[in-house]
Amino acid sequence: MASSIYLKRATQKALRDGYFPVVLGGDHSMAIGSVAGLRSVHPSTKIIWMDAHIDANIFDTSPSGNMHGMSLAYLSGVVPFHRHWKCLNLDQDLCYFGIRSYEDDELKLIREKGTLVFES
């Protein structure tokens, strides 16, 4: 989580200094820091999640238990004990594009929330 905090602060600083940060990384969990930083500076920004995965697992439903499959659960405040990351409403601030590989509980969550989805 320390790297997510660092990335959030770096994203905030870049935006406040007038830059448009491009965050490159090899793990979905990088979205926690970068999206949280973006939304803290520009709270009305909407997110288009272009990925095969919903990335909204929680520890109880994740087959792997890895954080990289929980990015949007963190950002929407669904992950218990990590609600301080909450900066997105799944029904208003997010659109999924291209999902095709997910757990049943993730799909149930975004259907319950009414998240906009464009499937491939």
Image (tube, rainbow, N blue to C red):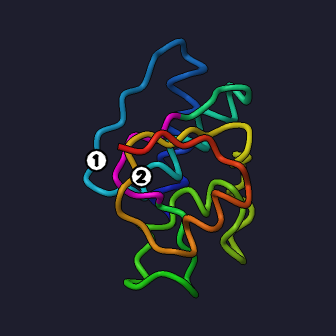
Examine the image and state in which quarter residue 106 appears.
Answer: bottom right
Q: Which numbered marker is on residue 30?
A: 2
Marks 2 & 1, CB-CB < 8 Å contact: yes
Q: Which numbered marker is on residue 68?
A: none
Q: Residue at x 50, y 63 (%)?
A: 2
Give the number of marks. Answer: 2
Q: Is residue 82 left or right of residue 100?
A: right
Neighbours of disc 1 within 10 Å: few (<14), some (14-19), many (20+):
few
Q: Residue at x 55, y 41 (%)?
A: 35
Residue 57: % across, % down: 53, 71
* Mark 2: amino acid: Met
Which stretch did the figure color magenta?
48-54
**Badge 1 is on which residue?**
25
**Magenta-drawn stretch contains 51:** yes
Residue 120: % across, % down: 35, 43
Q: Is residue 114 left or right of residue 116?
A: right
Q: Nearer the viewer, residue 83 or 113?
A: 113
Q: Nearer the viewer, residue 107 or 56?
A: 107
Q: Is residue 69 left or right of residue 86?
A: left
* Mark 1: amino acid: Gly
Examine the image and state in which quarter residue 65 appears.
Answer: bottom left
Which residue sits furthest top? 18
Work out whether 120 lies above or below 55: above
Work out whether 65 lies above or below 94: below
Q: Residue at x 73, y 30 (%)?
A: 43
Local secondary structure at mark 2: helix
Which residue sits furthest left? 26
Examine the image and state in which quarter residue 69 appears.
Answer: bottom left
